[in-house]
Structures are given as C-alpha cells and as structure tokens.
Image: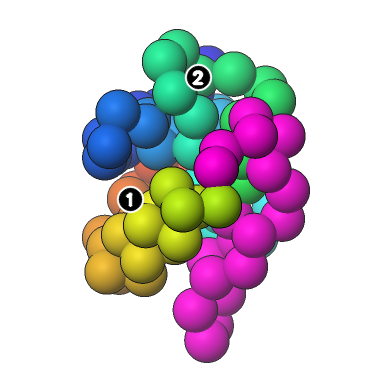
Amino acid sequence: MPKALLDFLGYSFFFWSNEGNEPVHIHVCKGAPSPNATKFWITKNGIELVHNKSQISQSDLKKIARYILQNRARIITAWFDFFSE
C-alpha cells in the first residue's frame, strides 16, 4: 500500500509499504501511485535518480529533483516515521 507524502506540479510523491528494507527513497508519478513510478534514492549527499519508468520529462525531472532536495529532511523523517510504525 503506498503512502502519499507530497504533491508538486501534479505529481504524487509516495513510499510503498513493503520497501522498508531498502535505503531511503521516494517514488514519483502523475495520478494514482503506480509500481512503474519514477524512483529517487535519498542519499547522504543528496539524491540520485534510480529510474524514470513513468517517463517524466527532463524539465520536470529537474524541478522534481530540486523539490526533493529542498524537502529532503522532511522526506527522511517521514520515511523513518512510516517504516517504524
């Protein structure tokens, strides 16, 4: 079950509940959460695009990456809160 976290430019940002054993990351897509959503690792030094399966345009990817970086601490906190429940 996905956990919606943020919304930006019409994109949903979410976690999947069965991925708590992976490093901190967030999925992004338009509309309802999808297993084929674009995925970003949230790393010690920033973020890393894992894949762009939802085929987000390069211009939107840049805006989304900037948005994730600006909300990095919030995403990390939400990740640990969500997976420690």
Element type where label 1 sits in the image: helix
Mark nearest the camera among 2 and 1 is 2
Tell me whether the residue at label 2 lies in contact with that at label 1, contact meaning CB atoms closer than 8 angstroms.
no
Which residue is pictured at 69% across the width and 25% down the height? 36
Q: Quadrant of residue 30?
A: top left
Observer-nearest of 54 and 69: 54
Residue 8 to residue 41: above or below: above
User: Quadrant location of the C terminus?
Assistant: top left
Q: Locate residue 66 relative to residue 59 in the image: left or right.
A: left
Q: Is residue 45 above or below residue 56?
A: below
Observer-nearest of 58 and 34 = 58
Give residue 40's position: percent from left, percent from top. 59, 55
Question: Residue 77: x percent and y percent?
Answer: 32, 60
Q: Amino acid at mark 2?
A: Pro
Q: Which residues are magenta?
A: 40-57
Residue 80 showing in the rendered view: no
Mark 1 residue type: Ala
Say whether disc 2 or disc 1 marks the residue closer to the N-terminus. 2
| CA gap, disc 2 and disc 1 | 17 Å
Name above or below for residue 85 compared with residue 77: above
Q: Which residue is mark 1?
A: 78
Identify the residue at horizontal 26%, vertical 40% (top origin). 8
- Based on the picture, tell me whether residue 30 belongs to the magenta stretch: no
Residue reaching furthest to the top: 32
Q: Which residue is mark 2?
A: 33
